[in-house]
Image (cartoon, rainbow, N blue to C red):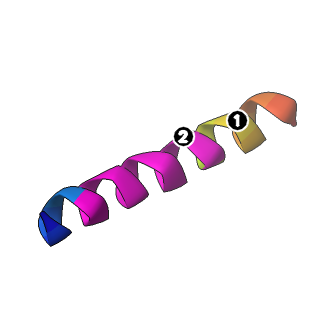
Amino acid sequence: EIDDLHIQLDAAKSLCRDQEEMLR
């Protein structure tokens, strides 16, 4: 289950980066 959390965290981080790129 811990690995699943890490995967979700990585996905959220990449999503945030995508949002930042779109805002620029």
Find residue 15 and report its image quarter: top right
- Assess disc 1: are there few (<14), some (14-19) or many (≥20) residues with their C-alpha within 10 Å of its C-alpha: few
Toward the top, the furthest residue is 22
2 in relation to 5, above or below: below
Q: Which residue is mark 1?
A: 19
Horizontal relation, residue 16 to residue 6: left or right? right
Q: Secondary structure at mark 2?
A: helix
Q: Secondary structure at mark 1?
A: helix
Q: Which residue is mark 2?
A: 15
What residue is at 18 percent from the left and 56 percent from the top? 4
Horizontal relation, residue 15 to residue 24: left or right? left
Where does the magenta region start and end? 5-16
> Looking at this view, is 18 or 5 the one in front?
5
What residue is at 12 percent from the left and 63 percent from the top? 1
Asked if the magenta segment contains residue 4, the reply would be: no
> Looking at this view, is 18 or 6 the one in front?
6
Toward the front, the furthest residue is 1
